[in-house]
């Protein structure tokens, strides 16, 4: 394995692993907590979580990792590693599209919901959609990490 491929492999595996770890913690601890709260506490708690720093870091880390995975697919001489790198990049693309297409827009709406208002009839539905999208993006992250591990082993 050459130095460029080593660096690319470490980057995509590390970035996708961090992404998965973050999403997994949310899936196992933060979301179950939030989903037990009544409307006013759910909104208040969600609004206290400042995602304006995390979202750009997560998005750009995922974009860079996915892009570098594609580059690694073309740098390696192993056909199996090429397939694994591309599958891993597809997984990172899935994380990003789900996050930016579903989760983040709903989160931005929650940030503007009034805490003292009687719950909106649509809030439970939006919360459910957000939760399902989070599960989907978590599974995409699992695919990415497993594929990038496979790529590293196949080199």
Image: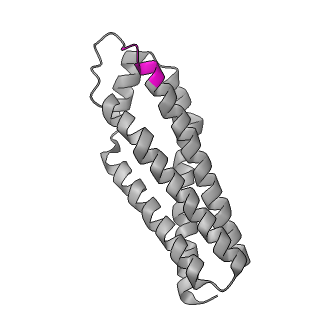
Residue that protrudes farthest toward the bottom in the picture: 2
The colour scheme used here is one colour
Relative to 3, say whether 139 is above or below: above
For residue 27: magenta?
no
Residue 35 percent across, percent down from the top left: 51, 24
Q: Residue at coordinates 67% horizontally, 60% vertically from top-left?
A: 146
The C terminus, quarter of image: bottom right
Q: Residue at coordinates 58% horizontally, 42% vertically from top-left?
A: 136
User: Could you say which quadrant of the image residue 102 lies in?
Assistant: top left
The foreground one among 77 and 48 is: 77
Asked whether the viewer can see residue 40, the reply is: yes
Residue 12 percent across, percent down from the top left: 54, 68
**Residue 96 in the figure: left or right of residue 45:** right
Relative to 140, say whether 38 is above or below: above
Q: How many marks?
A: 0
Residue 58 percent across, percent down from the top left: 42, 54
Relative to 124, say whether 63 is above or below: below
Q: Residue at coordinates 38% horizontally, 41% vertically from top-left?
A: 104
The foreground one among 96 and 115 is: 96
The foreground one among 50 and 128 is: 128
Relative to 125, say whether 6 is above or below: below
User: Could you say which quadrant of the image residue 101 lies in?
Assistant: top left
For residue 123: magenta?
yes
**Residue 39 in the figure: left or right of residue 144:** left
The N terminus, quarter of image: bottom right
Q: Which residues are magenta?
A: 120-125
Asked whether the viewer can see residue 24, the reply is: no
The foreground one among 10 and 81 is: 81
Residue 31 percent across, percent down from the top left: 52, 32
């Amino acid at each position: 394995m050459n130095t460029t491929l080593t660096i690319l492999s470490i980057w995509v595996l590390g970035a996708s692993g961090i992404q998965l770890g973050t999403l997994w913690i949310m899936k196992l601890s933060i979301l179950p907590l939030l989903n037990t709260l009544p409307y006013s506490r759910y909104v208040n708690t969600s609004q206290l979580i400042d995602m304006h720093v995390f979202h750009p870091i997560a998005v750009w880390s995922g974009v860079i990792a996915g892009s570098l995975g594609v580059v690694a697919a073309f740098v390696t001489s192993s056909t199996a590693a090429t397939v694994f790198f591309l599958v891993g990049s597809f997984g990172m693309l899935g994380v990003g599209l789900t996050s930016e297409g579903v989760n983040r827009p709903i989160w931005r709406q929650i940030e503007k919901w009034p805490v003292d208002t009687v719950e909106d009839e649509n809030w439970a539905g939006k919360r459910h959609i957000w939760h399902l999208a989070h599960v989907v993006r978590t599974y995409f992250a699992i695919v990415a990490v497993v594929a990038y591990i496979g790529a590293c082993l196949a080199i």
